Amino acid sequence: MDNKTQLLQLLKERCEQQTIEENECFSASSLADACHISRNTASQYLNEFVKQMLIVKVNSRPVYFFAKETLEKKLGIELTETSYDSFDDLLSASQKDFEKLIGHDGSLRALISRCQAAVAYPDHGLPILIHGATGTGKSLIANLMYEYGINQGILQKDARFIALNCSEYANNPELLTANLFGHVKGAYTGADSDQPGLIQLADKGVLFLDEVHCLKAECQEKLFQFMDKGIYHKVGDNENWYHSSCHLIFATTEDPQQALLGTMLRRIPITIFVPSLNERPRTEKIELITSMLQKESRHLQRELFISNLAYQTLMDHDYKGNIGELQNVIKATCANVLLHEDEEQLCIHLLDLPDALILAKNSLQMKYYNQEQEETMIPVRNLNRERRASSPLLTLYSHILETFQNSRREKESYDQIITRCKFHVQNFFDLLFFNQKYRFISSNESYLLKMLDKICSIVMNKYSLIVPNSQIKMYSKAFVEYTKNANDALIWLSFHKDDVEPLCAMVKERYPRDYSVACEIIENASLNLDIQMDDFMSIIFTLALIKTDKEENNGRVGLILCHGYSTASSIADTANHLLHEHIFDGIDMELKISIDKIVQLVDDYLKQKSPIQELILLVDMGSLEAIYEMISLSNCNIGLMNYVSTATALEVGHLIQQGKPVKDILSEVKGQFTLSTHFIEGMQKQDAILTICATGFGVAKKISELLTASFPREIPVNVIPYDYQSVLDHGREDTIFTQYDVQLIVGTLDPQIEGIEYLALESVVANDGIQTLLRYVSPYLSEPEQILFRQNIMKNFTLSNIVNHLTILNAEKVIDDVEDFVTEAEERMNISVDPTVRMGLYVHVSCLIERLMLRQGIEHVDGIEAFRSANAWKMEKIREAFSGIEMHYSVEIPDPEIMYILNYF
Ligand SMILES: Nc1ncnc2c1ncn2[C@@H]1O[C@H](COP(=O)(O)OP(=O)(O)OP(=O)(O)O)[C@@H](O)[C@H]1O
């Protein structure tokens, strides 16, 4: 196959396989690359194909090409042209008959199906009366009925559409009658030949009689016979009958009952009412303005911009002449701009609008200049992006607004409104979570996710909210999605500012606490991540946080407790999802959390939920069985089940839904689930490097991430974050050493495990440290990869990078504070920290500050009493040295934390 044929073939395939949109794969350069030819050659071939009518070209930037036949099949239309100025032009050309009506899928939907029925009715349609104020689109609808008849094969291709405006003959009814029915020679003075009437000319087609109320009674009567039997007399010939089978469409701006004879009305079986512009949804008004502005932009061949103020004024004006007037206003405005602007780009400002619009502005709303509120010029070409709203975020915005407006119209309760809106938010989160397209994230995004996780946790903690980690993850994903669509979201909001206002006000007023939490998360995100969120995003977050009556518990609570980052919340989410009801909450727990802490978490949670009559606890480990005795609930039945799984949660959920008492639920579920076990023998132990930190598992995890990120590619050495305390307590007997062949431990404090090398965090970047690491990883890396590994280590393991990575605090500031603390502690105790552990101490104290801010300080540790009495003086010195940090960060250091710090000295 030669290059040229191959190019055409490729384009056909792409058109078949891809959705038709402004996609790079339809550009000349992409096609050229795929066919291994130069861009110029590809362009030349493609343009030749355009001339041969094989390819359709869209002259946007870049230029897009589509295989004509495939495109036509896909869109179900016939394209008469092969070159379009823009993608919008192509899309408009691909719209068929009624699809051209803005509102065809909205306020005009019911009306359109009646029109379609009128056209399709055998043998040649039913007479129909279109009633509506001036400029509402009556003539356009009549035209589209005709087009529909042709497209559906109901009318023959050569059938005619003939329109007659009866008002033009208001003073000459005889002439109107003669024009309508035709006349014979000599019928009246000047009738010097036989003439066919419009009824005859429209035979087998459509005759549209506009302003039919201007038809005099005699003329109406003359029409009856035709409407009844399809026959009529020409003027001047009362003997011969003439026949026509045209479809009659009437239109009037007047009340039909007043304007037409009753006998006439009885002969018109279908009457439709076209709503005025004011009666149509605001979204349709936006769409109308948008499409008209874009049409002007294409017509003038200039890029058009409109200021926010001008746009709002266009939106707010009350158009007595409806769409017709709106169209004239837009044309007049563009003409004004053209008069005094000679640029490539035309900008519509408030004063370019016709005087009538400016004078009619019913209130003078003064805007005070504020740097953040500069007047925005909206590119007209972007206006309909939201109409196509391909991004799920914008779809969510539109759904919420629409739902709110509908619910208010239906006078639904606040709870119903919120439940409906929450449904869309949940769908959005589900999509981000479960849809393949959104599941994988880039490394930038994973950074955002981590930060947002932290921000959400801090804020939730501050408000003592127990929010499952899975939900926090959802918020983070929503943020990431926002960053991708921020621009479109702002444009959307600039359109809907007034519409969303009542929703925002309602949410702020009725759910102030949830709103504050949402705002705080968003403000912190803006501050730390340089993302400017719009107000509507705070509303969406608030909606996600609000608990509606349906989610309240009716005194019965299902709670899942599991170890792991999001195990409990994931099981709860899945079960709730499948049960179509919020039955369970999940509390996710760190791996090494103490029973006391768990009880405290559960107590806090139950306080939020009280009063509770029945509680079902589903837990993941036998060791948790004891907690139900420690929970401080009185007058409440508590049921506890072990070894929770999604299946058990579902079963329990079903029974809760059926209203079964807790006792019965337990006995029903018991015995239904048996554990199955498998044993796989002979697995060889894999090599591993452990990362540990006395500060906590989280830090160990981050160190392992930094280390793994330093490998130029994946290698068969497992880098496993592990619990420092566990290694310390069990030594070589710890299970980790039976599972893995641990080669090296990297961490902040040496757990002194015999026979296993320890590498202090601060030594990782030193030459010896890198050599140590290389000893374990070099067998898997080539020489250039080893160099890269070394560079990555140097880059990743700087103190400020580690602190930055581990905390959300400002690394430089926190390191300064920690340095002051360490120096002061050294001076007060007259000792100095061993340089080999200095970096570990810095990291430890930085993380400690954050933990204290999150109120996650370690309050209790075994042996603290003995330590206290043996080290009272040193502890006092550390406390004094730490007082600067305490004051600055408004935290308080508990004794066990001082004990940990002293370990470093
Ligand atoms: N739903 C619509 N979508 C897009 N354009 C519309 C729509 N309705 C009307 N228009 C446009 O508005 C203008 C006025 O419409 P049209 O002339 O059909 O109104 P009309 O009701 O027949 O007015 P009149 O009673 O004054 O004759 C036309 O340019 C038409 O194309």
Image (spheres, rainbow, N blue to C red):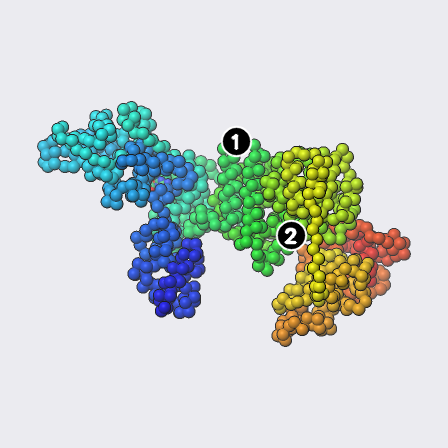
Q: Secondary structure at mark 1?
A: loop
The answer to which of 26 and 872 lies nearer the viewer is 26
Q: CA distance from mark 1 to mark 2?
A: 38 Å
Residue 37 percent across, percent down from the top left: 40, 69
Q: Residue furthest right?
A: 870
| Ligand 1 found in image quarter | top left
Q: Amino acid at mark 1?
A: Lys
The quadrant holding residue 111 is top left
Location of mark 2 (residue): 453
Does residue 552 show up?
no
Q: Residue furthest top?
A: 262
Does residue 850 show up?
yes
The answer to which of 198 and 297 lies nearer the viewer is 198
Residue at 24% x, 42% y is: 159
Residue at 74% x, 38% y is: 638
Residue 121 percent across, percent down from the top left: 31, 35
Q: Secondary structure at mark 2?
A: helix
Q: Amino acid at mark 2?
A: Asp
Residue 661 percent across, percent down from the top left: 70, 34
Residue 407 percent across, percent down from the top left: 52, 35
Location of mark 1 (residue): 411
Position of 137 with respect to 465 (left or right) is: left
Quarter of the image with the C terminus in it: bottom right
